[in-house]
Image (cartoon, helix red, strand yellow):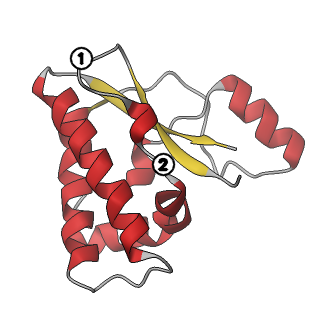
Amino acid sequence: MGTSVLVELERPVEDADPALLDGKALAYALDALDEAALELGVTPLGAFYHVSSDDADFLDELGVELDGIEPEDAWFDASHGLVSVRAFTRYVESGSFSSEDPDALLADLYELADLLSVVSGVGGRWRLGYAY
């Protein structure tokens, strides 16, 4: 099964289905993309990550360090995430980013961009999470 990135929406948005994002390739590449964020001048995707209290307890039981991430109820404007996702998409498309499976990563980025575009169009908010 493995870890995958998932998207949570603050409220349902017509034509926006977070379940369409596979998220496995994105989860695998997230740290490296976040490192590239500084070079690209965008917000790292990790900044949009949310840890619920339940997730924090589960991760603590597994011995996973949260590196200063505090459980909170944080939501982010979809338009801000869309800027980052579009920059990462261009970066991967250019061949500047080394990925084990660039096609799968691009599929995740395209799906995430489509989702955030719809959510942004109605002023919606979102956050990233992980499925284990």
Q: Residue at x 68, y 48 (%)?
A: 66
Contact between labelled residues 2 and 1, with CB atoms less than 8 Å apart: no
> Label 2 is placed on what type of residue?
Asp
Rendering coords of residue 40 (x, y %): 22, 71
Q: Residue at x 22, y 28 (%)?
A: 119
Image-quadrant location for residue 106:
bottom left
Rendering coords of residue 85 (x, y %): 26, 55
Q: Is residue 25 left or right of residue 124?
A: right
Q: Is residue 18 left or right of residue 81?
A: right
From this viewpoint, which residue is outermost toward the left?
121
Q: Residue at x 38, y 52 (%)?
A: 45
User: How many numbered marks are there?
Assistant: 2
Rendering coords of residue 69 (x, y %): 59, 42
From this viewpoint, which residue is outermost toward the top?
11
**Relative to the observer, which residue lies in front, 62 or 14?**
14
Q: Is residue 98 left or right of residue 80?
A: right
Q: Which mark is residue 122?
A: none
Circle 2 residues within 10 Å: few <14, some 14–19, many ≥20: some
**Relative to the observer, which residue lies in front, 54 or 29?**
29
> Label 1 is placed on what type of residue?
Glu
Indicate the secondary structure of the residue bearing disc 1.
loop
Residue 54 vs 64, above or below: the answer is above
**Relative to the observer, which residue lies in front, 73 or 102?**
102
Residue that label 2 marks: 22
Image-quadrant location for residue 48:
top left
Q: Quadrant of the C terminus?
A: top right
Sequence order check: which comes first, mark 1 or mark 2? 1
Q: Is residue 43 visible?
A: no
Residue that label 1 marks: 14
Rendering coords of residue 111 (x, y %): 31, 48
Q: CA distance from mark 1 to mark 2?
A: 19 Å
